[in-house]
Amino acid sequence: MKQVLIIGVGSRDNFKDRYILSELSRLPHNIFIAKSTYDDYWFKEYIKTTNVLSLDFSDITNCIAQISYWCETNNIYFDAIFSFKEHMVAQASIIAQAFGCIHTSLDNIFRASNSKLLFRKHYNTIDNQDVIKSEIILLDNFDNFEKLPEIKSAMVIKPLFGSSSCGVRQVLPGDDIASIIADSKQAISDKFNTAHNRGFLLENYIKGPAFSIDGIIQNNTIHFAGINEYMYGPLPYFVQTGNIIPASLSTDQTNFCKNALQNLIHHFGFNNTPFHAEIIINRDKIYLIEIACRMPGGKIPRGYELAYGFHFVEQVVNLYLGLPVNFEHKTNFQIIQKGKHIFNDCVIESICIPEDIGTITDFSLLTQEGEKNQYPSHNKPIYFYTVRANSLDKAHIKSHKIEKSIKIKTKLNN
């Protein structure tokens, strides 16, 4: 039995981490979790107490010392050490190296979305006519905002370090950038409890449908899991409301996306890592929004499972154990995963759910009656669901029927 240490887990109970933990628990390995000292141990049903390490990840040297002491006193060694959390992949790489395990290199990690500036600068050096490049404008932690740039075309502001599209929004010529920066910092502070000395950058806004291309690179061989199509709320914010697997792309478009991303992966030198690449297609060219050295987040791995029958979590474990990675498509269903959002500030007065709601795949009520809906900082779905069908048209019909059957009453939040 292999010994696998996962670095980092959600601070509180949530679907994404429950799904990962349940997938891990079905594998023939002994799974250990290294959680933050400050996080709750809410996952007792998946990982027993003796397999949980509590560490302070702000001191990585001490973390390694504690893990080595724990291994020595418990007469154990780890065959794989890695993380599913984007904000923990660097720490996991360092720890894995310390214990001689397969790891994603720090060079890869910091050329990916962990450092948006380093990523974009290296991305812009690629010599490929199929790839759209982007202007970069840095926005420092301005005190007086006297030297803010003049915006001449639509752009996107994003924090130099962040996740979940928090603090990201479209900026148009004439917009009050100082106010937008303040709003973005507040959104980050609301979500992550910190926005201290947070720098931002501006990139070109590229119009077009957005997708994620997901997979794993093992020993310089790219294994594509599939292409996922995003659904978004209204601009200027980029709130992801759902996704479609497989994406509504032709065979030629799918091959174009994979070939373009293959060239980008070689340009970045990525190897021995999962990848989650977010792209936009514009006039037969590709724009790489960002790429992460991790598997896709949210419920996308579950979507791939329902569509194709493989388990993404298992393949990530295989990568770091040095076992063959295989995204064989055992089934071919059309999947729509969607959260019902309301894009204004309001109070949810009532939610009327039909009695047969239990028959809907992965249905989850996420907002309770009486809760305040704050857009975009505290916007969350009222409910989430998945539909599976034999075609995209049939999936859309099912989706529309579900949303029509659930009645939501709101009142403006004064």
Image (cartoon, rainbow, N blue to C red):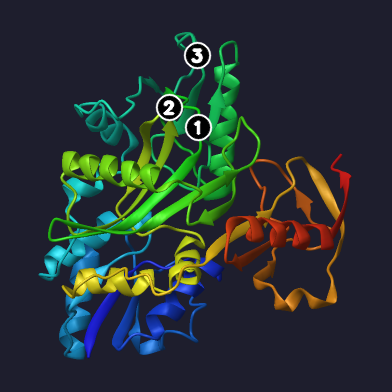
What's the distance in space between the residues labelled 2 and 1, CA to CA?
8 Å
- Name the amino acid, label 2: Arg
Residue 407 x/y as whole percent:
86, 59
Vertical arrangement, residue 307 with respect to residue 244, above or below: below
Q: How many marks?
A: 3
- Residue 78: image x %, image y %? 19, 79
Task: Tell me if residue 253 can be seen.
Answer: yes
Which is in the foreground here, disc 2 or disc 3? Answer: 2
- Answer above or below: position of 11 versus 189: below
For this rendering, which residue is in front, 122 or 253?
A: 253
Query: Could you say which disc has been placed on residue 268 in the image?
Result: none
Q: Earlier in the sequence, mark 2 or mark 3?
A: 3
Q: Which mark is residue 283?
A: 2
Image side of residue 284 versus residue 120, left or right: right
- Earlier in the chain: of badge 3 and badge 1, it is 3
Q: Position of residue 192 (x, y in %)?
A: 52, 49
308 or 405, nearer to the observer: 308
Numbered disc 1: secondary structure: loop
CB within 8 Å, label 2 to label 1: yes
- Which of the two discs, 3 and 1, sits closer to the camera? 1
Q: Quadrant of the N terminus?
A: bottom left
Regarding mark 2 in the picture, which secondary structure is present there? Answer: loop
N-terminal-most mark, 2 or 1: 1
Occupied quadrant, residue 360: bottom right
State left or right for residue 126 relative to residue 275.
Answer: left
Point 29% across, 68% down: residue: 316
Using the image, tell me which numbered label, if any, was put on residue 208: 1
Q: Which residue is mark 3?
A: 153
**Rendered residue at 34%/36% (across/down):** 116
- Point out residue 177 in the picture as x, y percentages from the top left corner: 55, 18
- Which amino acid is tagged 3? Ser
